[in-house]
Image (spheres, rainbow, N blue to C red):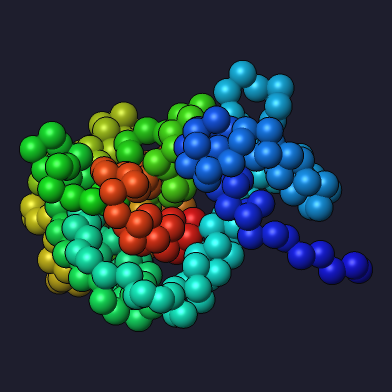
Amino acid sequence: MVMKNLPMDMLRSLVVINDEGGFTAAADKLGRTQPAISQQIKKLESLVERPLLNRNSPKLELTPAGEMFLRYARQILALNDELVGQFANPLMSGRIKVGIPSEFATTLLPKIIGRFAKTYPDVSLDISCDLSRNLLSDEQRKQYDLILALHDRVTPQQRRSQKDLIKTDDLVWVGSEGSRAHLQDTLPLVAAPSGCIYRQRALQKLGQAKRSCRIVYNISDLTGIEAALHEGLGVTVLARSTVPSSLTIIESCEQLPALGSIGIGLKQLHPGDNPVVQVLADFIKAGLA
């Protein structure tokens, strides 16, 4: 098998085309002409011997191979940028305000943020946790540089057109190991307050399945939800990728309806104002993709 090297600038062009929603916007952001960007993608497709973009679609659309390639490209670019950051001179500095749902602060983001902090030790991170609905509200959103948030419904068309979307994730029922709370006639739910996407989806699907339930514990913090489940108070709903290792996913249970999936997106509120914000955004996208 002949080994091939994939040029970083080509990988970056594909990622920016996807994130910006088209060739023209990508060319503006990268400081290149549109024909140059188009030629890069053709060369990239030739290297991997697969079409990455569906050119028969009226809107920008990745092929299945392109979707897979994009995930790897983000990770490769993040490692490249991390290595470059280790030798950057002058060192990046500043303060970044990030709003995220609490479950991500507890499970997925610490490792990503840890890597970023080691690479850019002079950058100060201010992390706040809240429900996605609150983070994206007009009142709160202007406080942040980046907002990681959940999106309730993501159709294939929305996934292709929504540049802020990182990925979709399955919603799952979760309980403590050995718990039989989900077998009770009236399902006891541990949930975040009204407005939480997990809570809304659970109540919607249980209602459609005509499964009786009651909310026994309201709390927005994942640590509190985890403690309540360990005490056997009930079950909850989480995105699969955020389930703590101490809890158990309740798979294929006839007493519980399927929950579908949600979107996980990252919104950059002031693009171009601070280069280090873009670097952190790339770290997060690569870590979650």
Residue that extends furthest to the top in the rendered view of this protein: 58
Seen from the viewer's position, the closer of residues 233 and 246 is: 246
Where is the N terminus found, in terms of image quarters?
A: bottom right
Q: Is residue 30 left or right of residue 243?
A: right
- Residue 208 lies in what quarter of the image? top left
Task: Name the residue: 81% across, 52% down.
Answer: 47
Q: Residue at x 35, y 66 (%)?
A: 108
Instruction: Please indicate whether residue 137 sits to the left or right of residue 78 in the image.
Output: left
When the figure is inspected, residue 51 is found, relative to residue 166, above or below; the finding is above
**Depicted 258 relative to depicted 126: above or below:** above
User: Could you tell me which residue is drawn at 90 percent across and 67 percent down?
Assistant: 2
Q: Nearer the viewer, residue 282 or 57?
A: 282
Q: Where 14 sits versus 233, above or below?
A: above
Number of marks drawn: 0
Is 278 placed left or right of 140 in the picture? right
Percent of width and height locating residue 155? 47, 30
x, y (%) of residue 285?
A: 43, 56
Q: Is residue 274 visible?
A: yes
Find residue 35 and report its image quarter.
Answer: top right
| Residue closest to the eye, 134 or 274 | 274
- At x 61%, y 36%, the residue is 33
Residue 61: x and y in percent read: 60, 31
**In the image, residue 237 lies at what x, y percent?**
28, 52
Please, which residue is most extreme toward the right here? Answer: 1
Q: Is residue 174 in sight in this rendering?
A: no
Considering only vertical position in the picture, is 112 above or below 68?
below
